[in-house]
Image: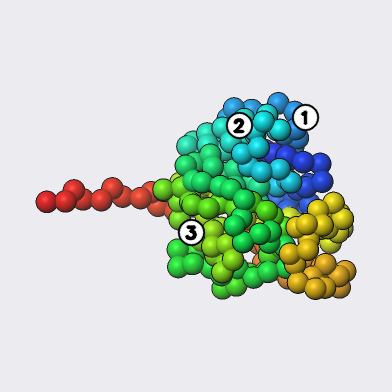
Amino acid sequence: MTTRILVVQPEETVPVGTLGDWLSEAGAALDTVRADVDDIPPAADGYDAVVCLGGGMGPLDDEQHPWLPAVRALLAASVAAEVPTLGVCLGGQLLGAATGGTVGRGRSGPEAGPKLVSKKDAAWTDPLFADLPLMPDVLEFHRDVVEHLPAEATLLASSPMYPNQAFRVGRVGYGVQFHIETTPEIVAGWVDRSPDVASAAETGAFDRDTLDRVHADMADTWRPFAHRFVELARGDRQPVEPRRPGLPLA
């Protein structure tokens, strides 16, 4: 039986990219809705998983982008129903906001370019993150951040500039601040359209040779991650065990 994944794309210039290729080669069928054009379903009925991509808008810019509340509602409903959910960059911020976290403009300014993030202790027993290297390669390109994780969230990866780089909320909801879906061509377009964000990167960060190298390194790490996400959606990989309620204090 085909594993169906609903992909929410907030902006034309931020497509599912290589992440879509990796999900498809693992046996998933992707249905993409453009959040700024199409109707957003209130729940993931009929789907085995949800992926929400990035975009240049802020996660709470509801006045300028009136479809944002519907995306947050979909993500909240998916987590509550234990539908495997992955939010990437803006998608991760929307997931954090939808499940009780706080989001906002990064106080240290934009973060951009190839970076390393560091796994936290909880990641070593997580069904998706356990097999990642200690410091996986990622691509950063954002202004906004998850400032405080939802109360029931578990931090999975961090970095000095912005600590909430990856988290799990509930048993199968995952948010990442960074990008894993890009190609060098996609990133070059972002650099041209958002020079204020791009200027935060190190010199040479967006040279073609550098982008080619980092994307090859990212594929080594995040392609298997995408395959594991499909396994989780298909039921071939078990989620984390539910949290046990603590004993009452005497």
The residue lying furthest to the left in this view is 250
Q: Nearer the viewer, residue 238 or 158?
A: 158
Position of 150 with respect to 57 (left or right) is: left
Q: Is residue 76 visible?
A: yes
Position of 85 with respect to 219 (left or right) is: left
Q: Report the number of discs.
A: 3
Q: Is residue 154 above or below residue 32?
A: below
Q: Is residue 12 above or below residue 219?
A: above
Instruction: Indicate the amino acid at tag 2.
Output: Pro
- Circle nearer the viewer, 2 or 1: 2
Q: How is the image coloured?
A: rainbow
Report how far apart the C-alphas of labels 1 and 3 lie in the structure: 33 Å
Identify which residue is drawn at 71% across, 26% down: 39
Q: Is residue 26 visible?
A: no
* Disc 1 element: loop
Within 10 Å of the Cα at label 2, are there few (<14), some (14-19), or many (20+) other Cα atoms?
A: some
Identify which residue is drawn at 86% across, 70% down: 207
Q: Nearer the viewer, residue 12 or 219?
A: 12
* Image x and y of residue 72, in percent: 58, 36
Q: Give the quarter of the figure containing the N terminus.
A: top right
Q: Is there CB contact under 8 Å for labels 2 and 3?
A: no
Instruction: Indicate the amino acid at tag 3.
Output: Leu
Position of 166 with respect to 242 (left or right) is: right
Mark 2 sits on what residue? 69
Identify which residue is drawn at 81% across, 41% down: 12
* Image x and y of residue 119, in percent: 53, 68
* Disc 3 element: strand
Q: Is there CB contact under 8 Å for labels 1 and 3?
A: no
* Image x and y of residue 205, in percent: 79, 70
Mark 3 sits on what residue? 155
Mark 1 sits on what residue? 37
